[in-house]
């Protein structure tokens, strides 16, 4: 897998978040400087009628939550963000913008040789 996506896989696995929420993370959603790393889930990128657009705060109040991250993941996120300092998304697409799940799945997660 492309090295750019290792942190994305760890965030998804350790936080138990679905693609729509992980791909919607913005740098302002992360608190990594304090003694405990926190990821605030504040939005989602749902697909509707074939289109994907950012929806703040999810569908319900229960969709908004703050999750603590283990130290290794906090460090991985810091390192990852250092390489994408001008991005609007924590996990941007190679040419900018948000990372689409279909593209990630076919190009990186299960590529065909």
Image: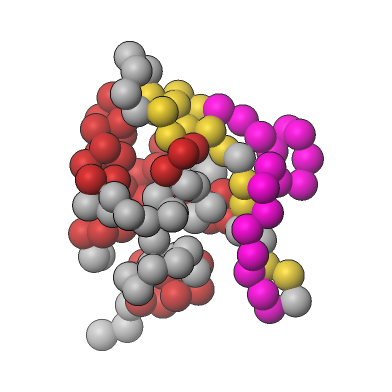
* Residue situated in front as seen by the camera: 83 or 6: 83
Task: Please tell me how many numbered marks the rendered image carries.
Answer: 0
Can the viewer see residue 18?
A: no
Where residue 38 sits, quadrant-wise, is: top left
* Residue situated in front as seen by the camera: 11 or 86: 86
Where does the magenta region start and end? 50-66
Residue at figure coordinates x 44%, y 54% from the top left: 89
- Residue at the extreme front of the image, as rendered: 86
Position in image of residue 1 (x %, y %): 25, 65
Where residue 60 sits, quadrant-wise, is: top right
- Residue at the extreme bottom of the image, as rendered: 113
State the scheme by which the image is colored. Answer: secondary structure
- Residue at the extreme top of the image, as rendered: 35
Q: Is residue 76 left or right of residue 109?
A: left
Can the viewer see residue 41?
A: yes
On whether residue 61 falls in the magenta region, the answer is yes
Relative vertical location of residue 100 with respect to residue 76 in this rendering, above or below: below
Position in image of residue 107 (x %, y %): 35, 76
Residue at figure coordinates x 45%, y 67% from the top left: 97
Q: Is residue 112 left or right of residue 65?
A: left
Relative vertical location of residue 83 with respect to residue 17 in this rendering, above or below: below
Where residue 70 sits, quadrant-wise, is: top left
Relative vertical location of residue 19 with respect to residue 40 in this rendering, above or below: below
Position in image of residue 82 (x %, y %): 23, 45
Position in image of residue 11 (x %, y %): 40, 42
Residue at figure coordinates x 32%, y 70% from the top left: 94
Q: Is residue 45 left or right of residue 39?
A: right
Which quadrant is home to the C terminus?
Answer: bottom left
Residue at figure coordinates x 53%, y 44% from the top left: 17
Q: Is residue 7 left or right of residue 38?
A: left
């Amino acid at each position: 897998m492309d090295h750019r996506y290792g942190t994305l896989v760890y965030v998804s696995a350790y936080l138990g978040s679905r693609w729509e929420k992980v791909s919607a993370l913005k740098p302002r959603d992360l608190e990594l400087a304090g003694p405990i790393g926190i990821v605030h889930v504040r939005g989602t990128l749902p697909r509707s009628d074939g289109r994907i657009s950012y929806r703040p705060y999810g569908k319900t109040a229960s969709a908004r939550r703050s999750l603590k991250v283990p130290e290794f993941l906090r460090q991985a996120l810091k390192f990852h963000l250092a390489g994408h300092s001008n991005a609007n998304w924590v996990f941007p697409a190679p040419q900018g913008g948000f990372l689409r799940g279909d593209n990630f799945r076919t190009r990186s997660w299960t590529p065909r040789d």
